[in-house]
Amino acid sequence: MSATAEIERSPLTKKELAADKPTWCPGCGDFSVLALYFKLLQNRGLHHEKFATVAGIGCSSRFPYFVQAHGAHYIHGRALPFATGIALSRQDLDVFVFGGDGDAFSIGGNHFNHCARKNVNLTYCVMDNNVYGLTKKQTSPTSPIGFKSKTDMWGAVDKPINPMQQAISAGATFVARTTHTNPKHLLSMMEAAMDHKGFAFIECLSECTEFYDGAFDSSNPRKGGEFRELPEDHDPTDENAAYAISEELVPGYFGVYYQISRPSKQDVEAEVNAKFLKKTKGLKDWEILQQNFDKMK
Amino acid sequence: MSDSSTADEAVSEDPKVSKIHEAVIRIAGNSQDGIQSIGGFLARLAGRSEQEVMTFMTIPSTISGGPSIFQVRLSSGEVLSSGDEADVLMAFYQHSYDNHTDFVKEGGIILYDTAHVEPNPEMEKRFRHIGCPIAELTVEAIGGTAKDKGKNIFALGLIARMFDLDGKRLEGLIAERFLGKPENVTETALSAFHAGNAYPLTTLAEIYEFEEPKARDTEQVVCTGNEALGYGILASGVRFGAGYPITPWSDIMELLRRELPKYDGIFVQCEDEIAAVSMAIGASWGGRVAITGSSGPGIALKGEAIGWAVMAEIPLLVIDVQRGGPSTGMPTNVEQSDLNIACFGGHGDSPRVVIAPSSVEDCFYTAIEAVNIARKYSTPVIILTDQAIATRIEAFGMPNLKETCQDISPDLTPREDHKPYDLSDPDGITQHAAPGTFIKSGKYPVVTGLEHNEMGHPSGSPKMHLDMTAKRHNKLKALGRELPKPEVFGPEEGNVLLVGWGSTQGSLREATERARKAGDSISALTIRHINPLPEGLEDIFSGFNHVFVVENNDGGLYGYGQLCGLLRARYCDTKIQGINKTDGLTWRVKDVLSRVQAKLEDNN
C-alpha cells in the first residue's frame, strides 16, 4: 500500500473502531477496558491494519469481536503462544492480548511464565474478576479463600495466585496493576505497557457484577474504598521491593510495580540472525540451501 | 568353519576377488560405539559412487548405552529395502553376536571382536567367522586409553578392505566429518582407519568388489528422512517454526533451529506442545505458513489447536514422526499407528489433510507439496512420517533447488472488501487477508474457533453451522479431485494387490518383485494421500482378487489396521484385508511374503 494513503488517513473514530456490540452483562468492568483500548488506539493514531487483537476463551476474551480490526479469538489459555507467533513473525504489528484470570493463570499458567521469561514484545492485559463468569460462577485461580462459588459452595479453599508476584518471578519486564473503576489510570497503564519494549503485563481488576458483585469495592472510592497508588518512593526497577509490595491482593496498590529493560525475544532472535545473515548476504534462498545439499553429496 | 586368526599368524597372500551386485552389512554394538557413523560413512560413500543405498538402525531409548545396530545395504542396482538378511555381521560384543547371528545369510560372514566375543561352535559350522582384536588394535594404532574410542573407524577400515571400497574417498569423508575439529582428531581417525584397512583378513578367502553401477544423470545426495523433510520445509518457503523436543521428531526441529536464521527465519523451542502448535498457528495467521511437529504423544496434545485451525481455516504444517505407541510406547521404534489420530483426532467434525511420504527423497518433495496444499486450501496439513523413514539413510538425485525453492511471503495488498468465509465459493476455499492488510471498506474479519458467519463473527444459526461444516469438507473434496491417481507397482491386474503407506513402500515393492520372479501374481500400491484419498482407487482394487493392506500397526479388534479400516469404510469392499505387525521393526520382505501366503490360505 502506498505511503501517501497512510498520511491522508486521520485517526480512527470510536465508531470506526467498534465492531460487534459487546455481549457483556450490564455493569461489567470489561466495558471500560474496551473503551480505553479504543482511546489508546485513537491517541496513538493506530489504523485498523497496524495492530492485532488476540484473546483466548472467557467473557473478557470475546474482546476481538468488538474491535473493528484484525483479530483472533483463539482457544482457552493459549492466547499468549498464539500471540507470540504473530508478534515474532510480523514484527511490523502492535500485538495486544486480552483475557481473563482463568485463561492467564489456570489453563494458560505455564504459557504466562514462559512468555514472561522470553520477554516477547507484546502487551497482555488480564481482566481479573476473581471468578469464572462465562461458565457461571466457578472458583477461579484468583478467587480469595472463602469465596463461595458453584464449585466451592462452602467457600474457596485454595490459596489464590498473586498475579504481580507470579509475573515478577517469571521474569516479566513490565508488571502493572490497574482497575476498571479508574479510567484515567487504566489508560495510562495501557500507554506505558504499549511503550514498553518486551512483555508488558497489566492486571486490570474488572468486576463481574453478575457473579462477584462488589469484589473490588475496597479499591473503589465510589463504593467507600480507597484507590491507592504505589508509594511515590517505590522503585520499579527493584525486584525485591516490587515483590514485597505486591503481597496484598485486594485492594492492593495500583501502578507500575516493576519495569526493567532487557532485550526482547524479537531482539535476541534478531541478534542470532544477524550473525548468520552476514554469511548469507547476497545469496538467494536456493543458494543457501544448495550449500547444505553440497555437503550431503 | 574357520578359526579366528591373529595378526601374528597372518600371511599376506592376496585373496581372490569376486564381483558382487550388492551387500548387506549389519554392525551390532552399543549405542555409544559410534556404529551409526560407520554406517553413515558407508552410505555417503555409496552415494558418491553412484550406488544405491538404504540403511536401517535401532537405537535404545536409554540415555546412554544399550545395544544398537546399524544395517546398511549397498547396491550397484536398485535398493528398495534395507535387506532381510546380512551378508556380513560385525559383532562388537557377545550380545551383538548372540542376538544377530539369526539375521545372517547362511554361509555369510561374521566379523567379531575377539576380546569380547566367544563364538558358538554351532554357529561356526553355519557362518564363516573372522575374529579380530578390534579394540586392542585400535588402541595400538591410535594410542590412548579410551578403549572404545576410534574402534568404529577401525571397523570401517576392515569393511573397506573386505569390500575393496574406495579408500581415498573414505579418507576424504572422514576428513570432512572432522572438519573444524583439531587436526590431531582427523589424524587419529585416519590412523584407526588405516590400521583397520591394513589388517590382513587371512581367513577370508575372497574380497568382494562391487560391480560398476549404472551411470546416473544427476549427482546423488545422501541423507536421512528427517534431514530431507527439514530441508524440504526450508525449500517450501516456511520461515517460522515452533516445537518441543520429542524423539524422533527432534532432529527436524534442531535442523530448523540451526538453518532458519540463515533465511532470517525463527524457530522457537516452546514450553510445551500446545504452545508450539499455537505459536505456529499464530505465525501462519500472519500470512506465511508456519510449521510445528512432534511424535505421537505430542500430536495428541496439539489436537485441540489443530481443531481450531480447521475451524478458522488457517493454513498450517504439522509433522508427525510416528513411533511405537500408545503413550510413551516405544520411542525409538517404528510404528504406523498415528494414522487415525492424524485423520480423525479432532473433536467435532474437523477434516484435515494427511500426507505420508514413502521414501527419504519423497520427504523433501512432500514438505513442499504439503505447504502448497495448506496455502491453496487454507487448511492444516499433517505429514505422517515414521521412525524408520526418519532415521534411515538413502541416496537420491540432487534436487533442482533453483526451481523447487519458493517464496511464500505474505501478500498484504490492500483490498476493497474482504469476506474470508465466503459461502458462494463453489469449492468452499477460504483465502485470508493477513493482519497488516488494509481493507478499504473498513470491515475487518476475525478468525475464531466459534462457529462464525462469512466475516468470522460468531453465529449460532443452525443453517450457518450446516453450511460452514459443509464448506470445510467440500474444500477437501475439491483437493481430492485434484490429487493424482497413484500408480500400481507391477501389473494393474492380478491376484494380490499389496497396499501400503509410508516407510513400508520399499519392502512391499521388493516383495512384489521377488514374488513375481517366483511366478506369483502380486502388485503393490503406495497411498501417499491418506486424507483426502485420491480418486480412482476402486478402479485399481477392481483389478485384483485380494487387496491386502500391509501396515506397521495393530489389526485391532476386527483385524484391520488403520489404513485398512479407512479403505474398508470408504469402499465397503470385503476383499480389503489387513496384514499387520507391531514389533517395532520394519517389514522384512520374507515376512511380507509369508504373511501374504498365510492370508491367502486363510481366505481359501
Image: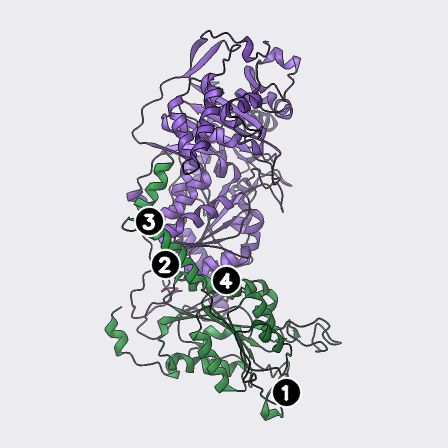
Chain colours: A green, B purple
In this picture, residue B105 sits left or right of residue A262: right
Of pointers 1 and 4, the one earlier in the residue sequence: 4
Q: Residues within 10 Å of mark 2 (few under 14, many from 20)?
A: few
Question: What residue is shown at x 36% (from left), y 74% (from top)?
Answer: A48
Q: Could you give the CA–CA distance between mark 1 and mark 3, rounded to whole angstroms?
A: 60 Å
- In the picture, the disc for residue A218 is 1
Q: Could you give the CA–CA distance between mark 1 and mark 4, rounded to whole angstroms?
A: 35 Å
- In the picture, the disc for residue A279 is 3
Q: Could you give the CA–CA distance between mark 2 and mark 3, rounded to whole angstroms?
A: 48 Å
Question: What residue is shown at x 44% (from left), y 39% (from top)?
Answer: B537
Q: Secondary structure at mark 1?
A: helix
**Kind of residue at disc 3:** Lys
Quadrant holding the N terminus of chain B: top right
Residue beneath disc 2: B426
* Pointer 4 chain: A
The location of residue B327, given as percent across then percent down, is 63, 47
User: Given contact means CB atoms under 8 Å apart, are the residues at marks 1 and 4 in contact?
Assistant: no
Of pointers 1 and 3, the one earlier in the residue sequence: 1
Q: Which residues are magenta?
A: B411-436
